[in-house]
Image (cartoon, rainbow, N blue to C red):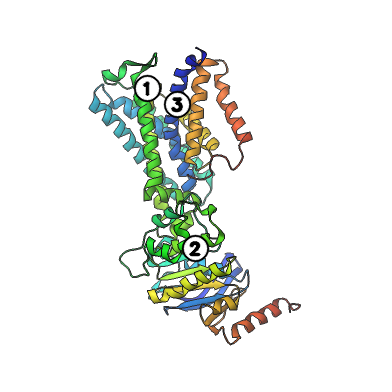
Amino acid sequence: MLQVSDLTVGYHRDDAVLREVCLDLTAVAVHAIVGPNGAGKSTLLHTLAGHLRPTAGTVWCEGRDVTRWRPHQAARTGVALAPQGRRLWPSLTVAEHLTVTRPARHRPGSTFSVDELLEVFPALAGRLHHHGHQLSGGEQQMLTIARALHTAPRLLLADEPTEGLAPTVARQVTAVLQQLPQRGATVLVTLPHVRAAAALTDTVHVLTTGHLSHPVTASDGQAERLLRDHLTLTNPHAE
Amino acid sequence: MRVDAYLIPVVDGVAYGLLLAIAAAGLTVAFGAGGVLNLAHGTLIAAGGYIAAATSSGTWPSLAAAVALAAIAGAAGGGVLAAATAGLRGRGHLDQALLTFGVALIGGDLLTTVYGPDTLRPRLPATLEGTVEAAGHRYPVDRLAVLVIAVLVVAAGYVVLHRTRAGRLIRATVDDRAMVAGIGVNPRLVDAAVLMCAGALAGLAGALSTPILGVGPGTADTALLLSLIIVVCGGLGSVPGALAAALAVGVVQTLGVTSFPQLAPYLLVGAMTVVLLVRRRSLPGQAAA
């Protein structure tokens, strides 16, 4: 859906978090970005969702320059963000999170009804009248993804969706993400480890201190080597 | 016997508190959702009062028109303020305070020029001018009507905030506006809608309060001061907090005036200081629900 060329993003002048990042998200598939903390993974996802303005570079959406679009414009076009830290609305119940969100009409997208979402995440069905802070970490993550899916996304940006989850819940979330391309939605997921990414896709990008690698294969150790090389370069004493 | 002596002032205080809640609810939500510090809020309340006093001529249709016009004028004023403050987004509260304070000064002057320096009261239909007897007490019909309408408005506000998508969007915007944008809703539209609703409620509160309090050159300042006290004590952005604070302010004011006339001017500020000193962060919400 999106093509990113030479994207540079920084919170301060002369201090870029992302440097000339290129990424092709036209294939309807799961795309994974792996990188250590502070590499710029969240910054990239927030930029693609319109929450941050790049200082250079271009984001194309089906031939249209959308580099400077605002978050609600990105969302209406079909870009949904499931952010790290969940960012649920504390004063809204689970049911309200799902009913305040409406699937965008008049465009293709992976439409999920509320009933379908509760089938995908059965743990939420029993918690409909609870507020976000009353949920467990896993339930909060499910609600974050369910909220994003209810907008009928064409591109789901999932920022470390399995972080801090029990292995069974993490597998459940991974399974949902894996199925999305079959429903017509592209997924861009960020993960801290190659191992976690390999469960989702065999082709990953490695992001290290703002630089994004070309797609590399997760299973043959290429991605792992890139990450290790980076760690050795930045910290020569690392094992 | 002692309790009985306080009954009427307490009922008066509750009615007054509900009016203040209607007035302050919009102010607190506008601040919570869009971070808009609207110092012209009192002027919208006064404008609603003046319009109601000038329109209501003693007949039921004119009274209905007075209330409707006050709310519409308030909504229009809210719309103007939304347009004016939209350009100041991201420039901090001081710029907004200066702009809306300027609007308040100009608006206040305009109201005095148009309606004169006297305190005005609306002419009400004869039925509302009498008294009714309940539980051995006589109580003015107009106050009772204001009390009933205020209860209905507060209940309607609750239903809108909790049972409609618009209300959920407003509460979500108070919680995290970026995530509201993330579901495809422009939060600036929510800000504008909130300011217009806040204006309508301010106009309505002004109209409802004129039969009891009248409306004059000091109305805007008093209404703004009381609304700010309520917003601060109730927790910025919290509607239930504002309702609780408004009822407390209404009862403290009314009981103070009837029972401790010499202390009355200090009671409210004293109570506010105590609330601010003892209130912990977790007390009446930091959010809209």
Crowding near the residue tagged with mark 1, few <14, some 14–19, many ≥20 C-alpha atoms within 10 Å = many
Residue B198: x %, y % from top left: 40, 40
Q: From mark 3 to mark 1, how far is it between C-alphas?
A: 11 Å
Picture disc at residue B14: 3
Instruction: Indicate the amino acid at tag 1.
Output: Arg
Q: Residue at x 39, y 16 (%)?
A: B135
Q: Are marks 1 and 2 on the same chain?
A: no
Dot placed on the residue nearer the N-terminal end, 3 or 1: 3
Q: Nearer the viewer, residue B257 or B160?
A: B160
**Judging from the image, what secondary structure is the residue with disc 1 in?**
helix
User: Which mark lies nearer to you, 3 or 2?
Assistant: 2
**Judging from the image, what secondary structure is the residue with disc 2 in?**
helix
Q: Nearer the viewer, residue A42 or B12?
A: B12
Residue A88: x %, y % from top left: 50, 56
Picture disc at residue A142: 2
- Residue B51's quadrant in the figure? top left
- The chain identifier of the residue carrying mark 2 reads A
Q: Are marks 3 and 1 on the same chain?
A: yes
For this view, does A82 lie left or right of residue B156? right
- Residue B131's quadrant in the figure? top left
Does residue A26 lie above or below A42 as drawn? Answer: below
Q: Residue at x 27, y 30 (%)?
A: B64
Crowding near the residue tagged with mark 2, few <14, some 14–19, many ≥20 C-alpha atoms within 10 Å = many
Residue identifier under label 1 = B143
Q: Nearer the viewer, residue B251 or B122?
A: B251
Dots 1, 2 in contact, CB < 8 A: no
